[in-house]
């Protein structure tokens, strides 16, 4: 496991040493889950941007919906 550092409000930082190990563990797992969810959403957003760019480039190169249908119907 790797350690990371995050910045929090001074009042929160002062309370942290008094937080029980059970609550710390719960907070760490919750934080890990949130980071994973955000990371996944960013990957999906990046993929969506890639698809939009591919559609635009295909359209700019003459690949309209009609042309695509024709290509798919050819044997």
Image (cartoon, rainbow, N blue to C red):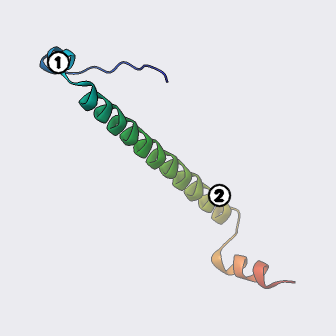
Q: Is residue 45 left or right of residue 22?
A: right
Determine which of the numbered discs, if any, sits on residue 26 in the image: none
Estimate the x, y position of residue 33 in percent, counting from the top left: 39, 42
Q: Is residue 30 left or right of residue 12?
A: right
Residue in the picture at 55% in, 58% down = 52
Q: Can you identify the residue that label 2 sits on? A: 57
Estimate the x, y position of residue 28 in percent, counting from the top left: 34, 31
Q: Earlier in the sequence, mark 1 or mark 2?
A: 1
Which of 56/30 is in front? 30
Q: In the rendered view, would you say 57 is above or below 73? A: above
Image quadrant where one finds the C terminus: bottom right
Estimate the x, y position of residue 27 in percent, counting from the top left: 29, 33
Residue in the picture at 65% in, 62% down = 60
Q: Can you identify the residue that label 1 sits on? A: 18
Q: What is the spatial separation of the Cα atoms under label 1 and label 2, in whole angstroms?
A: 57 Å
- Mark 1 or 2, which is nearer the eye? 1
Which of 31/61 is in front? 31
Q: In the rendered view, would you say 29 is above or below 19? A: below
Which of 25/61 is in front? 25
Mark 1 is surrounded, within 10 Å at the Cα level, by few (under 14), some (14 to 19) or many (20 or more) other residues, namely few
Residue in the picture at 19% in, 23% down = 19
SS for callout 2:
helix
Name the residue at the right extreme. 75
Q: In the rendered view, would you say 4 is above or below 74? A: above
């Amino acid at each position: 496991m790797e350690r990371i550092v995050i910045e929090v409000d001074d009042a929160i930082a002062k309370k942290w040493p008094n937080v029980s190990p059970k609550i710390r563990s719960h907070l760490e797992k919750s934080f890990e889950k949130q980071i994973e969810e955000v990371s996944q959403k960013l990957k999906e957003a990046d993929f969506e941007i890639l698809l939009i760019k591919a559609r635009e480039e295909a359209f700019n190169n003459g690949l309209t919906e009609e042309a695509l249908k024709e290509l798919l119907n050819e044997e």
